[in-house]
Image (cartoon, grey):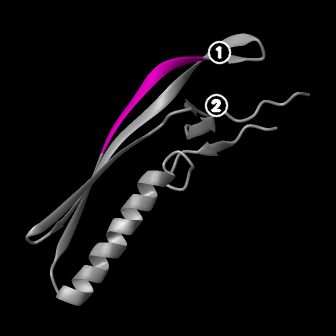
Amino acid sequence: MKRKIENLNLDSELLKPMKTKLESSIDTLTKNAILTGKEAEITLKINVSVTKKDREFNDEIQEYLQPNYDYQISEKIKEAKGSYKGFVGFNYAVTINDNSEVIVQDVNEQQSLF
């Protein structure tokens, strides 16, 4: 089975949980603004880091960089405030390709037997 490799963006599998929560917050606060006429604010804070990891692949130990995205989405309606926190990056590797694009790869995809 071919490993899934994709560009890093909000549509990539790695960042999908963050995007889904952000879109949900935008939808909720937009509906609230329509119904109440109150202004709302959404703040997205993302801490980005990488961690060196090892894994066994084809009877060899391979080193890779696991991305870590610690994020927090805060919602604020005049007097009400909600906050959501999450973390993504487990079991992914990140590299930079020849076009200077960040590439994301799932390191736990099923290995090919051929």
Query: Is residue 99 visible to the viewer in this orientation of the structure?
Result: no
Q: Amino acid at mark 1?
A: Gln
| Residue visible at 33% across and 70% down in the picture | 26
Residue that label 2 marks = 107
Q: Earlier in the sequence, mark 1 or mark 2?
A: 1
Q: Is residue 8 left or right of residue 81?
A: right
Residue 5 location, quadrant: top right
For residue 67, above or below residue 87: above
Q: Residues within 10 Å of mark 2 (few under 14, many from 20)?
A: some
Q: How many marks?
A: 2
The secondary structure type at the circle numbered 2 is loop
Residue that label 1 marks = 62
| Residue visible at 88% across and 27% down in the picture | 113
Residue 7 location, quadrant: top right
| Residue visible at 68% across and 16% down in the picture | 56
For residue 67, above or below residue 11: above
The quadrant of the rendering that contains the N terminus is top right
Q: Is residue 43 left or right of residue 113?
A: left
Residue 21 drawn at (x, y percent): 39, 59
Q: Is residue 51 left or right of residue 1?
A: left
Residue 53 painted magenta? yes
Residue 32 drawn at (x, y percent): 25, 81
